[in-house]
Image (cartoon, rainbow, N blue to C red):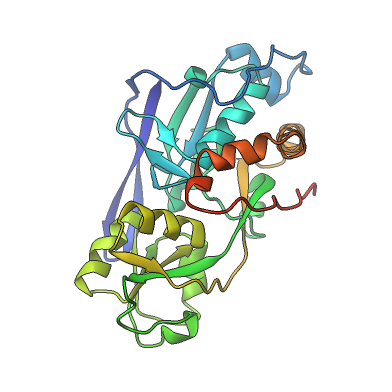
Amino acid sequence: MRLSKGFVAVAAAAVTVLGLSACTDSAAPESSVEVDEVADFEDGTTMARLAEAGEITIGTKFDQPLFGLDDGSDNPQGFDAEIGKLVAAKLGIPADGITWVETVSANREPFIQNGDVDLVIATYTINDARKQVVSFAGPYYQAGQDLLVLEGNPDGIEGAEDLAGKAVCTVSGSTSEANVAEYTDDIIATDTYSNCLEPLRTGAVAAVTTDNVILAGLADQNEGEFEVVGAPFTEEPYGIGLALDDTDFRMFINDTLQDAEDDGTWDELWEKTAGKVLDTPTPPTIDRY
C-alpha cells in the first residue's frame, strides 16, 4: 500500500496546506468486496483510464474513528475507506491498487482540482458552494452536526443555542466552522478534529463540533472522557467528491452505490465499521443531478 499524506500548518486558528509527502510502502488489507473483472468502459472515460492503470488515488481522513482512521500500518480503516474499496473493486482494482492520500477539510477541493486524487471520500458534506468547483456522487450517508463535551457535561450544554459566549473548537474550512458561527464567535479552528480534544480536556473550549458520527467515534475512542450532546442542528449529506463535470464517472459511482444499497453490501460495510458503535441507518436517496 502506498500512502501520501497532506501536511498542514496551523497558526492563529487558520490552516495552510503545504503539500504531499512521498509515498511509503506497506502491506494492504484485502478488499472488502469481490473485485470485478475489468469491464469494457468507453474509451476516454475516467473509468477506462483507471481500469487500464489498475490503480486509483483516493483522499480520505486519517483521524476519524469509524469512518477513516490510520491503523498504524498506513491503511485507513472505517466506512469511508470501505466505500473507497467498493468503488475501486467495481473498476477491477483491488485494495492494494489504492493509493490513500490524507485529506483534511481545507484541502479536499484543491486536491480534486489539481488532480492529486481521483476521488475524495472523507466525511465530505455535499453543498451548493462546493458543487461550483467539484462534482459529487451520492450521498451515501446522512449525518448531522452535533457537540462533543466533557463526560458529565459540566457546562450544561444541551444544544447549539447554549454556545453563546462559549469557546468551541472545530476544523478550519469545514461546514461545521461556518454553521457554528451562527451560535458563537469564539471559535478555535485547527486542521483535524483530534487536535480539538486537548483544548476540550483543559477547558480552553466548552465543546467540539462537527458531524455526530465523527464525534461518536472520538467519544468511543476515548472512553469515559467525552459525550455527545445528542442534539443535531444540521443535515450533512456525505458525498464522494470528483472532478467537476465528470458526469460519466459520477453516474458510474452512483450506480455502484445504488447496487450496494440494493444487494445489502452497504449494510455489510457499515456493520463492520461504524456499525460497531452506531445503529445501521437507512441510506439516503442518491441525488442524480
Residue 36: x %, y % from top left: 68, 16
| Residue at x 36%, y 37% (from the top left corner) | 70
Q: Indicate whether 155 appears above or below 280.
A: below
**Residue that appears at 47% across and 74% down:** 180
Q: Residue at x 48, y 46 (%)?
A: 276
Q: Is residue 95 rendered to the left or right of residue 224? A: right
| Vertical relation: 152 (above or below) 117 | below
- Residue farthest toward the left in the current orientation of the protein: 202
- Judge whether residue 113 can be spotted in this image: no
Residue 23 falls left or right of residue 90: left
Residue 279 in picture, x, y percent from top left? 57, 53
The answer, for residue 275, to whether it is visible in the render is: yes
282, 20: nearer the viewer: 282
Q: Nearer the viewer, residue 136 or 83?
A: 83
User: Eyeballing the image, is 160 above or below 29?
Assistant: below
Residue 163 pos. (x, y %): 41, 83
Direction from residue 91 to residue 10 in the image, left or right = left
- Residue 188 position, x and y percent, is 32, 69
